Image: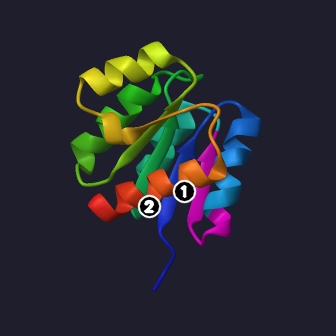
Amino acid sequence: MSPTRVLVVEDEAIIRIAMVDPLTDAGFEVDETADSDEGERLLDEDGYKLLVTDIHMPGKQDGVRLAKQLHRNEPSIPILFVTARADVLARLRAAGMTSMTIQKPFSPERLMSTVRGLLQNS
């Protein structure tokens, strides 16, 4: 069985590494990018089972728009939003996306438990 493919879109290198390393260590196949334009290009590839994305980042669109684009094409793929801004988290929660958010800073354990929960429920 091939590893689960995950796309991580995060502009802050240290945060991106803090996500990619535990995912890779857990056996996921991880592609990463620092902007939404490259994220959009990568999402055109088949095989992703999870998108982990920051909300605010460089590129033509933010993480929410990137997620909406993914859901138009692949509605079954779960999305994990990662942000440091509590106001953004509050808006996502108000929209019913409580299981799809994690606030920076986070521990590798918190990240992995959230990822596993999303994948089990998809």
Region of the chain picked out in magenta, as a range: 24-33
Residue 66 location, x and y as percent? 40, 33
Give the quadrant of residue 83.
Answer: top right
Please give the label number shown on residue 116.
2
Residue 10 location, x and y as percent? 61, 35
Residue drawn at 60 percent across, 54 percent down = 109
Give the quadrant of residue 24.
Answer: bottom right
Please give the label number shown on residue 112.
1
Residue drawn at 53 percent across, 21 percent down = 56
Instruction: Specify the amino acid type for callout 2.
Output: Arg
Residue 38 visible in image? yes
The residue lying furthest to the bottom in this view is: 1
Residue 45 visible in image? no
Give the quadrant of residue 12.
Answer: top right
Label 2 CA crowd tier, 10 Å (few <14, some 14–19, many 20+): few
Tag count in the figure?
2
Residue 5 location, x and y as percent? 49, 64
| Residue 23, above or below 114 | below
For the residues marked 1 and 2, what is the alpha-carbon distance in whole angstroms?
Answer: 6 Å
| Residue 7, above or below 81 | below
The residue lying furthest to the right in this view is: 14
Residue 77 location, x and y as percent? 31, 53
User: Where is the N terminus found, in terms of image quarters?
Assistant: bottom left
Instruction: Specify the amino acid type for callout 1.
Output: Met
